[in-house]
Amino acid sequence: MNKNNIQNYRFVCTLTFGDIYGQIIAWLITITLSLASALALMGARRPVYALATVALVIVLTLPFLLFAFVTTLLNHIELTAVEANTKTQSIPGNISQQQPVEATS
């Protein structure tokens, strides 16, 4: 594949915060329940069980969270072919074309 073939494709990521909002809320609920169970176990004779509970929940849920984020991201990547003579327009929200905010005194 040479450089000219790469320029014939349009690469856009359409991921928004709303797409992963539910995943974040579900993981925060899981962590909150984990901490609540750890606090309940803190009163036991061996508080090491409380720390082990939190560590176990985080270790077991983190791979699922990362898998969900990555698959959601990959589902929102668009790669479309464009004709070689077509002129592409920039996306309105492109950061590279925005002007920095200047302070006025």
Image (tube, rainbow, N blue to C red):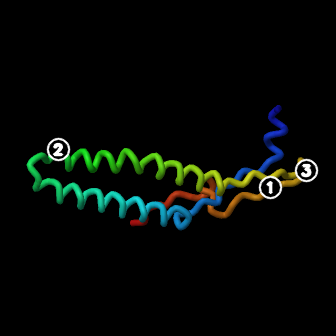
Residue 64: x %, y % from top left: 48, 50
Q: Which residue is mark 3?
A: 85
Residue 60 pos. (x, y %): 39, 47
Choose between 16 and 26: the one closer to the eye: 26
* Amino acid type shown at disc 3: Asn
Secondary structure under the numbered disc 1 in the rendered image: loop
- Of pointers 3 and 2, the one earlier in the residue sequence: 2
On the image, numbered disc 1 is attached to which residue?
88
CB under 8 Å between discs 1 and 2: no
Residue 18 numbered tag: none
Residue 104: which quarter of the image?
Answer: bottom left
Q: Name which residue lies at 53% across and 54% down.
A: 68
The quarter of the rendered structure image containing the C terminus is: bottom left
User: In this rendering, is residue 25 above or below 59?
Assistant: below
Residue type highlighted by circle 2: Val
- For the view shown, which residue lies furthest in the front direction? 45
Q: Which residue is mark 2?
A: 48
90, above or below 58, in the image? below
Q: Return the residue nearer the eye: 97 or 67.
A: 67
Q: Does residue 21 appear to the left or right of 82 in the view shown?
A: left
Crowding around mark 3 (Cα neighbors within 10 Å: few <14, some 14 to 19, many 20+) is: few
Q: Give percent across and percent down for residue 61.
A: 41, 51
Q: How many marks?
A: 3
Q: Give the amino acid type for the residue marked by disc 1 in the picture.
A: Thr
Whole-angstrom CA distance, mark 3 to mark 2, is: 66 Å
Residue furthest top in the image: 2
Q: Position of residue 87 (x, y in %)?
A: 84, 54
Q: Residue 94, located in which quarter of the rendered image?
A: bottom right
Mark 3 and 2 residues: CB-CB less than 8 Å, in contact? no
Is residue 88 found left or right of 99 in the rendered image?
A: right
- Mark 3 against mark 2, which lies toward the viewer? 2
